[in-house]
Amino acid sequence: MLFLLSPAKSLDYDTPVPEGLPHTTPQFVPQSTALIEVLREQSPQQIASLMELSDTLAALNVARYQAWRPRFTAHNSRQAVLAFNGDVYEGLQARSLSADDLDWAQSHVAILSGLYGVLRPLDRMQPYRLEMGTRLATEAGSNLYQFWGRQIAEHLNTRLRADTTPVVINLASQEYFKAVDRKALKARVIECVFEDWKGGNYKIISFFAKRARGLMARYAITHRLATPHQLEGFDLDGYAFAPASSEPERLVFRRKTPPSA
């Protein structure tokens, strides 16, 4: 099985990286380089408009594009799973995973990215901002979905080639999962949905759902999950499988009392 995650807008390039942590190089560097070249043609005002950013954030990211290099080093990059710092990654808590856990994750977790296409957890990543839904025009079309085309799905197929019954567990947002060409993907897709009790009903609460996706990835990593059925054992943070509300391709997990209640 392969677990898909979204990236995060928040990044951490300040906390020291654990000494001796392995690293790999992203697998779509030529494509990333091509996108950087397009982004470098944009002014700070154009970036602010394109990505709906403040002037300060636009200037920061223009500087990042200018500093970006196709060679990844310890000085200009760090492992993606440690660089991303949003809600999903607060649930994943990668820094507390063992070396064996991270080695397993490297083969079973894929982080979708507007700039990098797909990142493995230990792939070095330079800081950037480029959400998959950005309407950045390139020679391939008017947006990043057209730019990436079938490439991401074909990459996932390659990673799943050794599985007799390939399965993708989608823990990514719809914005990012849309970048996976379903017609080209040769795998069963299972979505995990996380709901909390609020106002007399179970509903998806964005903050909690994002964190739960990271928790599910952590559960898969630490338990070395190999079949979809094993997902049903997920019980972190008070969540439990809700079989009556689930379908074979859509597994629902619910919790009665969220931490903030």
Image (spheres, grey):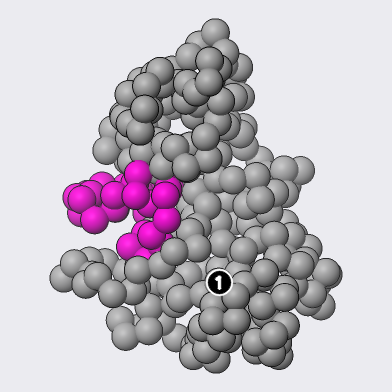
Q: Looking at the image, which is closer to me, 12 or 75?
A: 12
Q: How many marks?
A: 1
- Counting other residues with Cα less than 10 Å from the Cα at mark 1, is it few (<14), some (14-19), or many (20 or more)? many
* Picture coordinates of residue 249, whole percent (x, y): 61, 24
Magenta span of residues:
80-109
* Picture coordinates of residue 49, whole percent (x, y): 72, 75
In the image, residue 99 above or below residue 217: below
Asked which quadrant contains residue 213, the reply is top left
Asked which quadrant contains residue 115, the reply is bottom right
Left of 128 or right of it: where is 93? left
Give the residue number, with chain letter if any, for mark 1.
Answer: 129
Left of 15 or right of it: where is 192? right
> Is 107 included in the stretch rendered in magenta?
yes
> Is 98 included in the stretch rendered in magenta?
yes
Q: Looking at the image, which is closer to me, 20 or 214?
A: 214
Determine if residue 119 is in view: no
In the image, residue 123 above or below residue 167: below
Left of 123 or right of it: where is 181? right
In the image, residue 115 above or below residue 87: below
Q: Secondary structure at mark 1?
A: loop
> What residue is shown at x 55% (from left), y 17% (from top)?
201
